[in-house]
């Protein structure tokens, strides 16, 4: 059976975990998964790497040995790891937290995308780079200065990569995944309304059953990855997907 490779960040919980489980159920996929936490999960098709992606010097040193070699028909990079950051107005943000957030949400996916393209140059291999974005990439949200900015910048980086692309066999996406019932939403609900005026709205999403499950979003991300010919635009939102 032809082998495909998925490289995913932030696989230990939330959306990343649901995507991991979905791709491990596909025999044709090998998975390289990167988070700080390693899961107690054994599979001959899974390699886990424990890495803090906000520590850029460590990531930089690992880049030359990170990407598996092999005769893959398809290679996917899914930059999913992300952090909402401190939910506070600009003027009250900590420099260390800002640096960690920019490193994790923006620079780590930029490093990985750049190294992925340098490493996998064969035109005959289908390559997909999917950067997980947010609705917050295209609208300002009070209290989310770092989050909105990093997601907007990553979307622009993805657009530039797509414009530069040298092969019809390479696809780039910046995908908003909708509002998902994960730890990130728990963290958002722990903020206070002085720092985050939308707090009641986010509590209502949870209490009103309006959050989508990570599994449901994972199915849509997988659909995009497996059917890139159906998705011509770089900027995508899973809420507009129809699985056919
Ligand atoms: N949940 C939502 O409503 C929502 C909405 C829009 C966009 N998104 C985006 O969707 C993606 C997934 O979010 P989620 O809701 O699934 O978040 P989550 O439940 O908080 O999971 C985040 C994942 O990122 C990893 N991660 C965090 N910091 C890391 C670090 N320093 N180094 C390496 N890995 C790190 C975590 O693993 P470790 O802790 O083990 O490192 C975890 O696996 C994010 O990019 C987020 O911005 C989420």
Image (cartoon, rainbow, N blue to C red):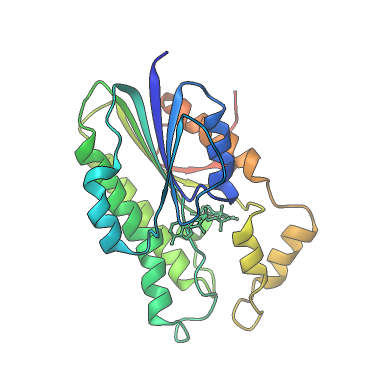
The image quadrant where one finds the C terminus is top right
Left or right relative to 123: residue 48: right
| Front in this rendered view, residue 60 or 232 | 60
Above or below, comparing residue 70 to residue 128 in the picture: above
The image shows residue 176 at horizontal and vertical percentages of 51, 48
Quarter-of-image position of residue 68: top left
Name which residue lies at 26% across and 63% down.
57
Residue 138 visible to the viewer: no
Image-based side of 93 in relation to 197, left or right: left
Q: Is residue 218 left or right of residue 174?
A: right
**Residue at image coords 52%, 65%:** 84
Q: Residue at x 43, y 82 (%)?
A: 94
Q: Residue furthest top?
A: 1
Q: Which of 227 and 22 lies nearest the eye of the viewer?
A: 22
Report the front residue among 204 and 99. 99
Residue 77's place in the image compared with 34, above or below, is above
Q: Visible in this render: residue 90? A: yes
Residue 149, image quadrant = bottom left
Residue 228 screen position, x and y as percent:
42, 28
């Amino acid at each position: 059976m032809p082998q495909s490779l998925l490289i995913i960040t932030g696989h230990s919980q939330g959306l990343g975990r649901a995507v991991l489980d979905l791709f491990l159920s596909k025999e044709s996929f090998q998975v390289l998964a990167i988070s700080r936490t390693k899961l107690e999960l054994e599979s001959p098709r899974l390699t886990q790497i424990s890495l803090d992606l906000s520590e850029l010097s460590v990531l930089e040193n690992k880049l030359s040995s990170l990407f598996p070699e092999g005769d893959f028909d398809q290679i996917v990079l899914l930059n999913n790891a992300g952090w909402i950051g401190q939910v506070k107005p600009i003027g009250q943000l900590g420099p260390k937290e800002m640096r960690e957030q920019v490193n994790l949400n923006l620079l780590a996916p930029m490093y990985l995308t750049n190294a992925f393209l340098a490493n996998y140059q064969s035109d005959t291999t289908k390559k997909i780079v999917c950067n997980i974005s947010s609705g917050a990439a295209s609208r300002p949200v009070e209290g989310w200065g770092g989050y909105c900015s990093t997601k907007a910048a990553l979307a622009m980086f993805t657009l530039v990569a797509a414009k530069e692309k040298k092969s019809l066999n390479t696809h780039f996406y910046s995908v908003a995944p909708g509002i998902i019932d994960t730890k990130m939403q728990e963290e958002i609900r722990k903020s206070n309304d002085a720092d985050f005026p939308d707090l009641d709205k986010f509590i209502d999403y949870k209490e009103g059953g309006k959050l989508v499950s990570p599994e449901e979003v994972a199915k849509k991300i997988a659909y995009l990855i497996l059917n890139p010919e159906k998705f011509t635009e770089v900027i995508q939102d899973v809420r507009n997907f129809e699985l056919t």
